[in-house]
Amino acid sequence: MREFIPEDAEEFFALCTNPQVMKYIGGEDVPANVEAMREKIVAYPDYKRHGFGRWACIHKATGRMIGFTGLKRLDDFGGEVDLGYRFLPEFWGQGLATESGLPCIRYGFDDLGLDRIIGLALPENIASIRVLQKCGMTFERFVVDPHAGRVVLYSISPTMLNDS
């Protein structure tokens, strides 16, 4: 995992325009083309503003960007920090979201000093909910996401991580 770079634009655009991938992503503004995606990557403020953000996941064998995982501060949720992940369909079911999500959670607690991390998913996205559970998160409540509508909110604290 690493920060996104402009050279990821083509693969990131393919990820964000894949109908299977975007089926459970509500209301995200996807750039119109690869060049607009490159501009979005260059302008991505989270690394500088917060010291963290979503990270590109690179397939070791091919060097290909196959998705992302990482933490993001959500202004729509009072500044809560969210664990998010997204992978190309050919990489689903291999445990990559959990494998990359757990170190992100540890990083959030151990390096960033966070006291809580949340995960959001549409209720019908059973696979994503399962990832949140495998990462040690527990169901907290239903909430309304201004972009996606009614979603489940899972959360974890440092003590919960240590208990799992």
Image (cartoon, rainbow, N blue to C red):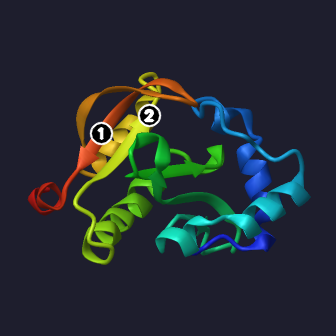
Please report contact status of discs 1 and 2: CB closer than 8 Å, yes or no. yes
Left or right: residue 77 versus residue 26 is left
Q: Tell me the quadrant of the picture where the C terminus can be found.
A: bottom left
Left or right: residue 152 versus residue 89 is left
Depth order, front residue of 80/33? 80
Q: How crowded is mark 1: few (under 14 residues within 10 Å), some or many (20 or more)?
A: many
Residue that carries the numbered disc 1 in the rendered image:
154
Name which residue type carries label 1.
Tyr
Q: Where in the figure is residue 103, as x and y percent of width and height?
A: 36, 68
Depth order, front residue of 4/101? 4
Is disc 2 placed on a helix, strand or loop?
A: strand
The residue located at (51%, 51%) in the rendering is: 85
Name which residue type carries label 2.
Ala
Q: Quadrant of residue 160?
A: bottom left
Is disc 1 placed on a helix, strand or loop?
A: strand
The residue located at (33%, 47%) in the rendering is: 118
Q: Where in the figure is residue 125, as x and y percent of width and height?
A: 47, 29
What numbered label is drawn on residue 115?
A: none
Question: Upstream in the sequence, badge 1 or badge 2?
Answer: 2
Depth order, front residue of 43/78? 78
Residue that carries the numbered disc 2 in the rendered image:
121
Report the Cα–Cα distance between label 1 and label 2. Answer: 8 Å
Q: Where in the figure is residue 80, as x and y percent of width and height?
A: 37, 50
Relative to 147, does residue 46 appear above or below in the rendering?
below
The residue located at (57%, 58%) in the rendering is: 68
Relative to 122, does residue 68 appear above or below in the rendering?
below
Q: How crowded is mark 2: few (under 14 residues within 10 Å), some or many (20 or more)?
A: many
